[in-house]
Each structure stands twice: as structure tokens, then as C-alpha cells.
Image: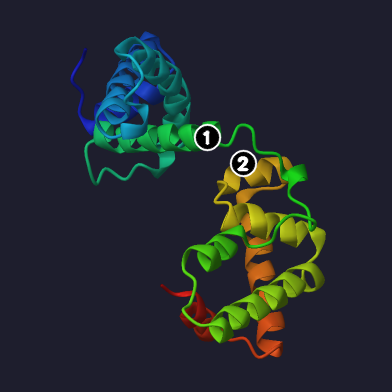
Amino acid sequence: MIERTNEQWIADLTTSSAGQTQALQDLRERLQRGIFYYLSRERSDLAQLSTQELTQMAEDLAQDATLRVMENLDSFRGDSRFTTWATKIAVRVAISDLRRARYKDFRLDDVTAEDELLPAAANLNNHNPLPNPESAAERSDVMTKIDSALREALTDRQYQALEAVALRGVPLEVVAEQMGTNRNALYKLVHDARRKLRTSLEAQGLSMDYMMDLFQD
């Protein structure tokens, strides 16, 4: 594999010639090695996979990563080695792909206003019961008000977005794809939903500090 300076990498990758073909192959091989290292050394959740399986994953991801690097060549400023910069992009591609795979069975249509609302808070309430009936009743009353606020203050679309992203932890790109929108628009949708929910709860006399204190360990 040819050793190149930053300038040589950029020149070879942006010149339509046999040199570009070789540079692309070299880049893909470097990214594959970087991704394999990440998958095998830094992802304990993949420990059950064989070396062959990890190698195949790295090969597949390196294809996408190479395209992503090429799409972002204009953003390279030369503050680090080109291969270091490119490998960081490749690892981000791997992380994104693994997150998407984790939620491959997620369906936004399953998130409706009839679902159990705020499951995380409900579990917290069950796992950390307060020692007296008055405090337990207070928690139950607050959960009822949160339930009401979610149903009445938010549109169906806001509810789905907030439930999926904030409560279930589904990646933005997965939810955005299923909602037929983009990350920026989804981020704004979730932000607006949070704001409306906070306003509704505060109108009922429930501040965020109060609720955090109520449900803390």
C-alpha cells in the first residue's frame, strides 16, 4: 500500500485517473482495518461473533465509509493525518449502522396514544417505592397528570416522536426515516413537543425540579 501525505491523498482521490482507482482501494482497505479494530476491540456486545463474521461486517461497512469520506472531502482541513480523519468517519458509519440494526424491528406505527405512557418513569416508580403511602399516592397523581399532558398537549406526530426518541431511545435517523422527514426537522419536532409538555405540566403546578425530586432514588 502506498504511503501518502495529506496532499497526495486529496490529489489522488480527486483526479480521474488510474491513480484514483488505486487510492480508493487503499483507502477502503485502511478503513476496513480501522472498522475491524473498532468492532473487535471496542464493542463488547459483538464478542460472540467470529473473526470471519467481524471481517465481513468490516468489509461491508468499509464500502459505505469510503463513500462517506468521498462525500466529505471538501471538509478536510488538514488538522490531522488524512487517514486518521477518514477512520473517524468510518467508525461513525459503523456506530450508526449498528444502532440502526439494533432497532431494525422498531415500527413507529406501534407507538400510539393508547400505549403505556412514560414506561421508564413507571418502572422507576415500581422499583423505588417510597416508604409511606402519602408519597406513593403523590407519585401516582403526578403520573396521571403526565399521562394527561401527553395525551392532550401533543399532536399524534409529536407524541410518536417524543416517545420514540426521548423515552425509547430510538436513533434519530431511524425515526426520521419512518416519519418521512430528516434529522433536523425531527429534532425540532421533539424540541417543540418537550416545550409543550413542559408548559402543560407547569400549568398544572408541576415543575421539572419537583418531579425530579419526587422520582429520585
Query: Horizontally, is 97 left or right of 25 in the view?
Result: right
Q: In which quarter of the image is the C terminus?
A: bottom left
Q: Is any atom of residue 1 visible in this view?
A: yes
x then y, percent, for residue 96: 48, 37
x then y, percent, for residue 37: 26, 26
171 and 127: which one is in front?
A: 127
Look at mark 1 in the image and give the residue it sits on: 102
The tag earlier along the polypeptide, 1 or 2, is 1
Q: Residue 26 carries which label?
A: none
Classify 18 as above or below 129.
above
Q: How crowded is mark 1: few (under 14 residues within 10 Å), some or many (20 or more)?
A: few
Residue in the image at 64% along x and 70% along y = 194
x then y, percent, for residue 190: 65, 62
Look at mark 2 in the image and give the residue it sits on: 174
x then y, percent, for residue 141: 67, 80
Q: How crowded is mark 2: few (under 14 residues within 10 Å), some or many (20 or more)?
A: many
Q: Give the Cα distance between marks 1 and 2.
A: 10 Å
Secondary structure beneath disc 1?
Answer: helix
Q: Is any atom of residue 71 visible in this view?
A: no
Decide: marks 1, 2 in contact (CB < 8 A)? Answer: no
Residue in the image at 44% along x and 29% along y = 70
User: Type of residue at label 2?
Assistant: Val
Residue in the image at 60% along x and 32% along y = 104
Residue in the image at 18% along x and 20% along y = 3
Classify 201 as above or below 155.
below
Classify 76 as above or below 24.
below
User: Type of residue at label 1?
Assistant: Arg
